[in-house]
Image (cartoon, helix red, strand yellow):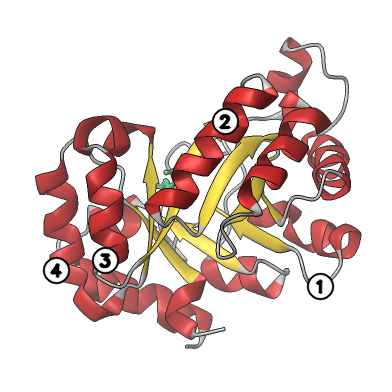
Amino acid sequence: MESTSRIIVALDFDSRRAAEEVVDRLGDECRFYKVGLELLAAAGPDFIKHLVAEGHEVFLDLKLFEIPNSVAGAVRVAGALGASMVTVHSMGGTDIMAAAVAAARDFPRLRVLALTVVTSMTGSDLADLGVNASTEEQVLRLARLADGAGCHGVIASPQEAARLRGVLGSSSLIVTPGVTLPGESPSEHARPGTPRAAVAAGASHIVVGRTVTRAEDPVAAVRLVRADLGL
Ligand code: C5P
């Protein structure tokens, strides 16, 4: 894998102008961007097309949790926009994940990733939902379900990557947000890890947001991420 393609920078902004400013500053330093609901709602789908046309890969983080027909429709739109990754909630169950995977078949570059347990959640948050499992048990259970539904990979915290790699085998994608540089405050991430630790544990890709996008010098910050990875 091209080294720059392992690092996905999350463009969590509320305007196209702010996102473009970071993309322009990063230039060739970053190839892969994550666009979530905030920026999609603010900037519209044309911005995804624009990023793809400029040679970037786009992870469209839609976190789909809907009836299978609606999930399939949204995945087809993500594919038509040129996205490389799209997310579906594994908590929605096998049917919606299978519908997403089936819809993605028309778009050979599109990978369907299942969200397991968001990195801000702890065991007590799960208990509040009536889930009597540790976050790790729940992540592994949902990852098996996603794998069985044909998903190309999962989203999980760096701390679960090693167990997941064991469960999913070598070809699945494991994409880890909740990544911070050594010594950096983990903000609201409950289960953080450094880029190096995430990849050493088996992550195929890491998602880095504010560490890069809110840095005074985003280029220097992304280089620090790469250096931590030994790239
Ligand atoms: O914290 P950071 O700015 O690096 O967040 C980057 C991405 O990681 C966000 O777009 C979000 O989807 C994901 N994230 C997460 N759990 C958190 C915080 C962020 O999954 N607690």
- Which disc number belongs to residue 25? 4
Amino acid type at circle 3 is: Ala
Rendered image: mark on residue 195:
none
Disc 2, ligand 1: is the CB inside 8 Å? Answer: no
Q: Earlier in the sequence, mark 4 or mark 1?
A: 4
Q: CA distance from mark 3 to mark 4?
A: 17 Å
Q: Is residue 48 left or right of residue 16?
A: right
Give the mark toward the camera: 2 or 4: 2
Q: Amino acid at mark 4?
A: Arg
Q: Cα distance, mark 3 to mark 1? A: 31 Å
- In this figure, which residue is indicated by the disc labeled 3? 53
- How far separated are the C-alphas under marks 2 and 4? 31 Å
- Residue 109: x and y, percent? 55, 65
User: Which mark is in front, 3 or 1?
Assistant: 3
| Nearer the observer, 126 or 103 | 103
Horizontally, residue 107 falls left or right of residue 53, namely right
Q: Amino acid at mark 1?
A: Ser
Cα separation, mark 1 vs mark 2, equals: 25 Å
- Residue where numbered disc 2 is placed: 64
Q: Residue at x 43, y 63 (%)?
A: 8
In what quadrant of the picture does the N terminus appear?
bottom right
Q: Residue at x 29, y 70 (%)?
A: 221
Q: Nearer the viewer, mark 1 or mark 2?
A: 2
What residue does disc 1 label? 170
What element does badge 4 sit on? helix
Q: Nearer the viewer, residue 142 or 101?
A: 101
